[in-house]
Amino acid sequence: MPAAKTDSNWTLVVRALRHRNYRLFFGGQSLSLIGTWMTRIATAWLVYRLTHSAFLLGVVGFAGQVPTFFLAPFAGVWVDRWNRHTTLVVTQVLSMLQSFALAVLALRGTITIADILWLSLAQGLINAFDMPARQSFVVQMIEAREDLGNAIALNSSMVHVARLLGPSIAGIVIALAGEGYCFLIDGFSYIAVILSLLAMRIVVLPQTRTDESVLHDLKEGWSYVTASVPIRSILLLAALVSLVGMPYTVLMPIFAGTVLHGGPHTLGFLMGAAGAGALISAMWLAARRTVLGLDRVLSITAAIFGAALIGFGFSRLLWLSLLLIPIAGGAMMQQTAASNTILQTIVHEDKRGRVMSFYSMAFMGMTPFGSLLAGALASKIGAPRTLILGGMICILGAGWFAHYLPAIRELVHPIYREHGIIPEVARGVESATGLRIPPEE
């Protein structure tokens, strides 16, 4: 009997995999993401080996992320106009070529910091289109809307498993053969996700046909986002947390070396612990049966994330830091996944690409500016105080969101009823308890 219950719980956690298209995507993307993390580690190591400059490490990271901030809203307009499946195939092919270009230059021994900078910028441009297209495409892979949240949580699990495996594999490959082979492996890993996309059987959604300009559609998307209290509030909280909280990873080497008096292994333990916390949190989120209650999760996890950052900032003990950082990683993951799930559930289909582009802008687009801000503050007041200040602002943001939560729910619940989410949950509770639940007033 316990075994049957365990099997049932596991089936619940991975229920999105029953959809053939998502199952293909999950398999291909899992392999590709390991290659992506290998490239991230190899790029950082190569930049530092060539220049021994922390500043240039930051510049390369900034170049790879900042295009999302400036281009994602325009990319969202095109995603709403284009076939999202085709768009993803194109972005994956371009990303593969970018990795192969890095590999060729590195293996020939002719790569320069300028090459890395321009190729990182090119990948950032590709990602500006890839991210909103990929986020919007999840709906087309999942036929049952009630499995959407599970699919998004499994996506997060996939990212964090790759985050644990990729750097470890990269370290071995770099030690044995050099950075170029990491780029080469990453290039070949894109073949897996490209083949999975080509193998899908996709029901093509009607494309938006318009004679209006891109700027007109961009303004329309912006008006839609700003006029919707739930969407606007979720994106504002996401942007705030990404600006002041997410850059904790940039300061991690300082904590590992200066604050905790460790070395590279200490940094590895801290980053691995954050990834493990995020993975466990993602699996918990994947086990949720419904999107109901996720709005409350947003304010709770933002507050927990802030409190964990404050505790980490005060900690001078490695064991305590290793207990706190998984909490921060897990809370940040839930913040990201819960925001994504709610937005995907309530947004109008013809504006999905534009809304998800603003989501990408809020989360990923704000990160490079947060990194620059964190670096500047840390040089003035120190890394611990910078992290404590960021944690306090995250808690204030959580309080602000919680204040508007009743108004947000009042607007969101009619959309849930329209999509059949609230009646479905009620029927499930009635079946399990034998009690009749009256309809909401």
Image (tube, grey):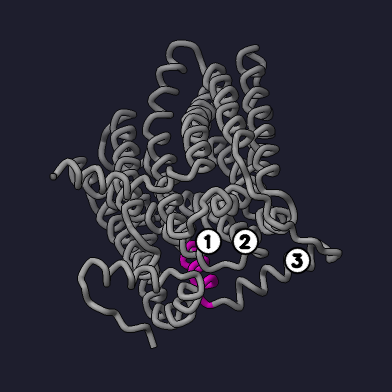
Quadrant of the frame with the N terminus: top left
Callout 2 secondary element? helix
Nearer to us in this view, 267 or 157: 157
Look at the image and give the residue range highlighted in magenta.
Answer: 229-239
Mark closer to the chain start, 2 or 3: 3
Q: What is the residue that sits farthest to the left in this orientation? A: 1
Give me the residue at 74% from left, 56% from top.
81
Q: Which of marks 1 and 2 is nearer the N terminus?
A: 1
Tell me which residue sits at (55%, 26%) in the image: 189
Q: Where is residue 367 in the image (x, y as percent from the top left)?
A: 52, 52
Give me the C-alpha separation between circle 2 and circle 3: 12 Å
Which mark lies nearer to you, 3 or 1? 1
Q: Is residue 91 above or below residue 324?
A: above
Residue 232: in magenta span: yes
Q: Exactly how many numbered labels are in the figure?
A: 3
Mark sitting earlier along the chain (3/1): 3
Question: Residue 161 vs residue 72: left or right?
Answer: left
Give the CA separation, mark 1 to mark 2. Answer: 7 Å
Q: Mark 1 points at which residue?
A: 344
Residue 48 appears in the figure? no
Q: What residue type is disc 1 on? A: Gln
User: As drawn, is 118 to the left or to the right of 384?
Assistant: right
Q: Residue 352 carries which label?
A: 2
**Quadrant in which residue 196 is drawn:** top right
